[in-house]
Image (cartoon, helix red, strand yellow):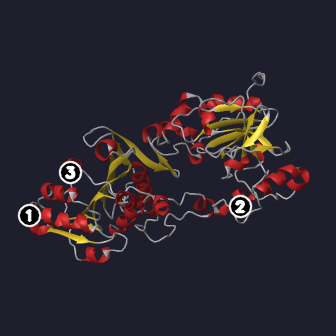
Amino acid sequence: MNTIIERKKKIEYGDFQTPKELADLVCQKLVEIGVSPDIIIEPTCGLGAFFESAAIKFSGAKKIIGIEINDDYLSELSVRSRSFLNPERLEARNGDFFKFDWNGLLKGLDGEILVLGNFPWVTNAKQGAIGGLNLPDKTNFQNYNGFDAMTGKSNFDISEFMLIKVADWFQKRNGYLAMLVKTSVARKFIGHLHKTNIGLNYSAIYKIDAMKHFGAAVDACLLYCHFDTSSHTYDYEIYATLSSQTYYRVGHRHGLTVKNLDIFEKLGHLLGHSDEKWRSGVKHDCSEVMELTEKDGKLFNGLGELVDIEDAFIYPLIKGSDVANDRVSQTQRFMIVTQKAVGEATKPIKLIAPKTWGYLESHAKYLDARKSKIYKSNPRFSIFGVGVYTFSSWKIAICGLYKNLNFRLIAQIQNKPVVFDDTVYFLSFDSYDEAKNVLDFLYEQDTQDFLSALIFWDDKRPIKTGILNSLKLNTQSSLVQQPELF
């Protein structure tokens, strides 16, 4: 039982204690690039690896302050710190980051501050799943609204919230931030600084081996920022390691976060908007009921039940893994598509296809229990991600989860338009000629390089509609021989 409780607490607090070796390397890097603070604050100091390293590497610092919520960690640190260099300037306090009086602390400190450490590597969704309480007040601090706020984009890393809180400390003072975080969080944070125009002189990301240091399979880094109230420099450098001397530049252009500014600027003529938009596949959040599999000419749902319904609302389904692995010419999977447009009435299904309506009603306990708020104010058995584009004869598709730019040209299957799950993004076409022309354009080297300059492959879903829709499509039709259908 104790093991379960300890594991829950480790998850709740994102408790990946920094090894002393890594803390030493980080502090040494800061010294090498000229960081020389008057005050050092470690807001979540844990067992004190950074606290100890900072005491050695920054001998000129007047004060080093550590805040820690865990009483056991704090007790151990208080004993150990007596042997650190110049212990009289060290101060370890008990405190909860989300409730601590940071303004009161900062008001009494003069000189340049370095905020140093390792914030928790956990999301608010994970916290909620385990019933954790180590959370900020539940506010939509990223200002997502509507569909995005209700379907998951408002999920965030706790460290992202904490970094934004720290940024507020530098609104009226110069100083430094050096924090170990997920690389995706570091990028979002610098994007926040750009969006809110917080004074920033320089920033960089130094990749670290999280598996080596923490046993964690995550892309992580040292995020470094030099805050300066009079500067607004939001382009930043990414280094492969703490010791690397080479880097590439990342920045913000035209509302996009650009992974490689040099390539992006070279291929800027491809930036633009097209009449045809990339869309995501159908969202229904109930695969065991809405998705069917054909076996020996019969359809079964995810519950293993034989399904005998009309063909009118059944469409061939290609999933993201199928798109990624080029399994797109045939399928044994199908989806019940209850609407042709978002918000369309579903009750007519009862007249058009009574067996289908009866099937939906008999499984209402699953469909009515869907958690997302988007279903609550829409017709019963609603789905999302549907429109005229869903029912086009030809599509170009790509899976957002895979780390490549493999686009697939997809025809109808069994004389019906193909639908996708919501991990797939696609373009719709009425003619093969136009679709094939665009597909050829997507595989041109300049096009691939342009998109690659915008994609961060370490993201959980690296390919996004915002990136795809920033590409000005070449939609001019060319004379292409119609192929035989599969």
Q: Residues within 10 Å of mark 2 (few under 14, many from 20)?
A: some
Q: Amino acid at mark 1?
A: Asn
Q: Nearer the viewer, residue 121 or 433?
A: 121
Is disc 1 in contact with disc 3, using a CB cutoff of under 8 Å? Answer: no
> Would you say 229 lies left or right of 462 here?
left
Q: Residue at x 51, y 59 (%)?
A: 155
Q: Is residue 270 above or below residue 352?
A: above
Q: Position of residue 185 (x, y in %)?
A: 42, 53
Res 20 label: 3
Which residue corresponds to the image point at 12% horizontal and 61% vertical from the top-left? 60
In the displayed structure image, the side of residue 71 where residue 270 appears, left or right = right
Q: CA distance from mark 1 to mark 3?
A: 19 Å
Mark drawn on residue 368: 2
Number of numbered markers:
3
Label 1 or label 3, whichever lies nearer to me, is 3
* Quadrant assignment, res 365: bottom right
Q: Closer to the observer: label 3 or label 2?
A: 2
The answer to whether residue 380 is left or right of residue 45 is: right
- Circles 1 and 2 in contact, beta carbons < 8 Å: no
Q: Residue 86 bears which disc, if any?
A: 1
Name the foreground residue: 109 vs 412.
412
